[in-house]
Amino acid sequence: MQTPLSSNDAITVRDLQKIYRIREGGSWRGKTRDILALNGISFSIPKGQIAGFIGPNGAGKSTAIKILSGILRPSSGEVRVNGLIPWANRVEHVARIGVVFGQRTQLWWDLSVGEGLALLRDIYGVDSGRFARNRARLADALDLGGIMDQSVRQLSLGQRMRAEIAASLIHDPDILILDEPTIGLDAPSKLAVRAFVHELCRDRGTTVLLTTHDMHDIEALAERVIVIGHGRILADSPFEDLRTTTLSERILELDFNGTPPELTLPTGATETTRTPHSLTITFDPHQIPAPALVAHVGQLPGLDDVRVSRPSIDEIITRFYADHAA
Amino acid sequence: MSPSPTRTLGAFGLYRRMAGASIIAQLRYPGTFIIQAIGNFVTTLLSFFGIWSLFQRFGSIAGWDIGTVAVLYGLVNVAFSVAETLGRGFEVFGGEYVRTGSFDRLLLRPRSTLLLLLGHELRLRPIGRFLQGVFVLVAGLWLAPHVQWTATLVLPWAVAGGAAMFLGVLIGQAALCFITVEGLEVVNVLTYGGVEAGQYPLTMFGRWLRRFITFVLPLAAVCYYPALFSLHHPDPLGLPIWIGAFSPLAGFVFLGIMVLAWNRAVAGYVSSGS
Amino acid sequence: MILRPYFTAFGLQWKIGLRYRIAVVAGLVAQMWFGAVTLMAYASVYHAAPDVQAPLSLRQAMTYTWIQQSLFTLLPLGCLPAIGDAARTGAIVYDLLRPVDMWNWWLSASLARLLGNAVPRAVLLACVAGPLAMLMGLGAWSLAPPAGLAAAILALMSITLGAFLSATIVMWWNILTARTLSPLGSYAVGTPLAVLLSGMLLPLPLYPDWIRPFLLAQPFAGITDIPIRIYLGTPIPGGVVTGLGLQIFWLSALTLLGRLWMRQTVNRLEVQGA
């Protein structure tokens, strides 16, 4: 179904295709091979939404991010970001987006955070009044007060990431692209980054596109998840939907104060792991509801503890990719 | 209260800010800077001592007086030091931008990539070569027999043309990095090799080298001819002497060609992604 | 076996030197270029002053230049890169704690690095500048064969001593690096000294006569200048024995003093580390 590229959407992508031509063998031999990195993907993200963009390495995620950022030209397909074609109007386009690459710094190693922000003010042409307000607001929200005068080289990873996020927002971009923003961070820093992004979206209506391998980022932030694999979109839905459609399984863990006994299980439940003092059973609650299963095992001799849990998001995603591998 | 209009800093203003920041960064380690600048000064001064020794032993440099050779030497070194100062971002482009992937980061800034790379670093270290070149140049003017007053105009113009030419070489080297980052030592032939060749009079070289440094790399146009013009020395190869007043323009033409090559290389990078 | 760790250190650095094949070819092109520029300049200077009796004939000066160019990477331009990195990151402390003789450990690594860089380049350049240039009809510009069989054998002995001497001087740069915790100082000091005093810039015999005895007596002459003189059969005051004697003297003196300096440095680092 063809709809016009809507102006209410912050990002619109249609039939995006990217083929890399790789030289094989030595660089002077003429043999080339084509690699299809994106095989016709389409999606659109309305203004003010936080969308998670996930997929295994090599799925085409970073290619898509590069195209949306205007630093790579696709082989075919249409893209509008803020109504602009990213690669055609690079300078105009990048002035209106903010990008954080978790692995690479956009600040200057030998300058302090404050000096780096001032330089970005000049690069983006932010006037001084707006710069002062944004700087104060970001310093407050990201807790940068103590590190403004430190050189970037001396910052811890968590401090640096907070500074990076401030750097990407100093010019009030309408769209923020976060590529692995929590990679390598400790737990408090991760929570701080997530809380900040959440507020940014709520208070300022910034559209956020987030790629990550940390499924907790997705669970905490994303209203919507786009799963990409083999250059195609495998799923595009609210995260909770993904959880229910992909995996309704539950897990029952039993601890014993002796060797777990042999047991027969009702249909829908299977024993998955057995250790000297515990048993793990997975079951489908549609076939055997949790209370019934617990009642079934409740009288086993030596039973110490019983826990029912949902599978972790990592397991869901792993399972999802496995299902779509074919 | 009406919103204040956004005033984007012009290219030159932004360059000044970036250069200022890079100077702050370099002076954070003043000891390193001083040692390197002195090393740079001594190295280049010693290399003139080599030429002077040849002159001492043979009475002339292939029939040229030491004053003329000193002017040539000073010109090429001052011009190269200016290019080294401005063009550091292009010199390290392969290692610091292409190999690490940070060129993508640069493309995310709403400015020309050339401007951003110029702003990578305003390098202070070549001040050693610069001072030493000025020193030899002034000594040469003092020793040379027929210095023209127009030299005060033509020599700075020649330095500008020479700096443009060497900057062009560095930009070309950076453009080459999109194809390969290995074996870039070859470009030394044009940079350090250019300085080496530029400090001798053109007549000393065989025809192929003369042609190369006249038509491929316009080294003669920014050094040899302006020096002859400034010293009122007729060209043994027969070109009219006034050529030297205009020839430094060739340095800027060379720079222009390299800028075009750079823009093509960046466009190629954006469409191929490698 | 007691020598084993030193062989390991040697093998590691030797392989690093050989890994960069494209760099070797690129370096060859650059060195051919520098050689060609220098040769043309010398030819021009010699032809312009046919009456001057220089200590080297033009052919000898050319051969001298080719050998110097081909052995450029044998010069002690600065510390061993691995030690520079270790100094920057602070990992150098671990190096100093190894249960081996630190001097021999670093010396074998430094020697391997020099040879790994220099040997492939020297062989390639010697082939191109020697037989290949002859075949192409550039005999007058080519690398001349050694003065005789005895000269060849003695020159080979002498260059072996030269390589050890160079590695010993690199050791001094290594210690300087360990003391200042930065490789920059060693390069700032080492490069100009090595380039000038080894004869890379201008053959040592061509400097003004009053300075020549000093230039011959200083340690850098023992790296390439003395071996080249033996190869060419140009007289050294006192004969070949003086040449080899000077090399052995500097090798022993720099080793003894260097070991003392190293022990003192290690003590100092241990005190600081505690």
Image: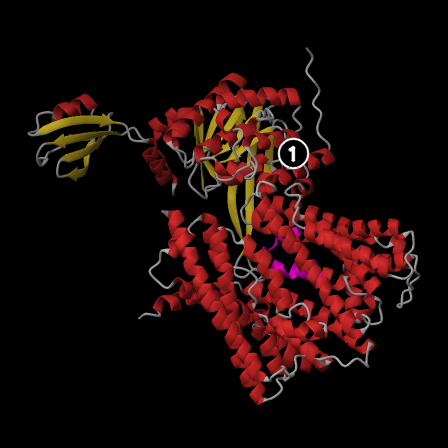
Drawn side of residue A26 relative to residue A252, left or right: right
Q: Position of residue A234 (x, y in %)?
A: 43, 35
Mark yes or no: residue B8 visible.
yes
Mark yes or no: residue A72 visible.
no
In the picture as drawn, the residue positioned furthest to the bottom comes out as C149
Disc 1: which chain? B
Q: Position of residue C27 (x, y in %)?
A: 61, 65
The quarter in which the N terminus of chain B is drawn is top right
Name the residue: 36% across, 47% down. C274
Start-end of magenta stretch = B174-194
Drawn side of residue C101 relative to residue C29, left or right: left
Q: Position of residue C8 (x, y in %)?
A: 38, 66
Q: Secondary structure at mark 1?
A: loop
- Residue in front for this viewpoint, B141 or B211: B141
> Which quarter of the figure has residue A110?
top right
Q: Amino acid at mark 1?
A: Pro
The reply to whether the magenta stretch includes residue C220 is no
Residue A281 vertical position relative to residue C34 in the rendered view, above or below: above
Residue pointed to by mark 1: B110
Residue B191 vertical position relative to residue A134 in the rendered view, above or below: below
Q: Position of residue A60 (x, y in %)?
A: 49, 41
